[in-house]
Image (cartoon, rainbow, N blue to C red):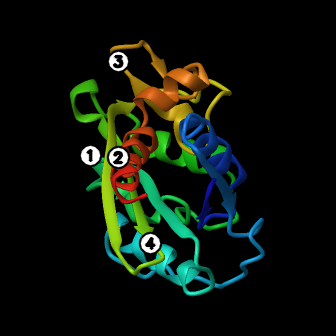
């Protein structure tokens, strides 16, 4: 079975990744589970650059396939903020309840048509032979008016999907994985990996 090391320490993200990749013949471990401890400075200017930075940093310590993602929320009305700073928005140790409340207050009074937003996920891979790949997945929606739902994490409770009439945190996990930016990007990366393995 092929081992893949995912360059993240985020437990929620790892759970989601394992669910999405469940039917693949691969064993996915986090960098922490693989015993790789490396400080990664995410100083790229795009999701793709940051994903590549993470993947390369971990690949330097292993012969396994390394995947990394960089993901976040883009709100059109706020000039695509928080964007690549989604995890660090309003401070790295700030809870997502606070981050979500802050974004809702910044969007107060903004009409429906101007509340468009998307989740973006770039997934980068570094293969043992040195090959590198990067893909991008997105999920379009809008910013809701209140925090709702307990199934997701991060900005899911304020990300409203008009066609489903709920936030992404109110979707069943399997439905969210089917629709999500991360699900789309990982499925694209999976197709690339299947050709290489």
Q: Residue under circle 1? A: 77
Residue at 58% across, 30% down = 147
The residue mark sitting in front, 2 or 1, is 2
**First-in-chain label (2 vs 4):** 4
Instruction: Using residue 85 as the reference point, say whether residue 10 is left or right of it.
Output: right
- The quadrant in which residue 154 appears is top right
The residue at 35%/46% (across/down) is 191
Relative side of 20 to 161, left or right: right
Q: Which mark lies nearer to you, 4 or 1?
A: 4
Residue 127 is tagged as: 4
The residue tagged 3 is: 162
Residue beneath the point at 58% across and 21% down: 170
Q: Nearer the viewer, mark 4 or mark 3?
A: 4
- For the view shown, which residue lies furthest in the left direction? 113
Across and down, in percent, residue 197 comes to 43, 58
Badge 1: few (under 14), some or many (20 or more) residues near its Cα, within 10 Å? some
* Lower position in the chain sequence, tag 3 or tag 1: 1
Q: Is residue 149 left or right of residue 65?
A: right
Structural distance between the alpha carbons of marks 3 and 1: 17 Å
Q: Is residue 144 visible?
A: no
Query: What is the number of callouts on the image?
Result: 4
């Amino acid at each position: 079975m092929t081992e893949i090391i995912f360059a993240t320490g985020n437990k929620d993200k790892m759970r989601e990744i394992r669910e999405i990749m469940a039917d693949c013949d691969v064993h996915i471990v986090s960098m922490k589970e693989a015993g790789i401890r490396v400080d990664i400075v995410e100083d790229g200017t795009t999701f793709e650059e940051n994903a590549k930075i993470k993947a390369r940093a971990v690949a330097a310590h292993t012969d396994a396939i390394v995947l990394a993602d960089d993901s976040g929320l883009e709100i059109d009305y706020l000039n695509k903020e928080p964007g690549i700073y989604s995890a660090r928005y309003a401070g790295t140790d700030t809870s997502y309840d606070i981050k979500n409340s802050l974004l809702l207050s910044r969007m107060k009074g903004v009409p429906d048509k101007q509340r468009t937003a998307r989740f973006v996920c770039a997934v980068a891979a570094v293969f043992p032979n040195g090959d590198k790949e990067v893909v991008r997945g997105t999920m379009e929606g809008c910013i809701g008016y209140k925090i709702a739902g307990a199934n997701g994490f991060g900005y899911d409770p304020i990300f409203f999907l008009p066609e489903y009439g709920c936030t992404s945190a109110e979707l069943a996990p399997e439905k969210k994985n089917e629709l999500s930016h991360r699900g789309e990007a990982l499925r694209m990366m999976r197709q690339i990996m299947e050709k290489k393995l």
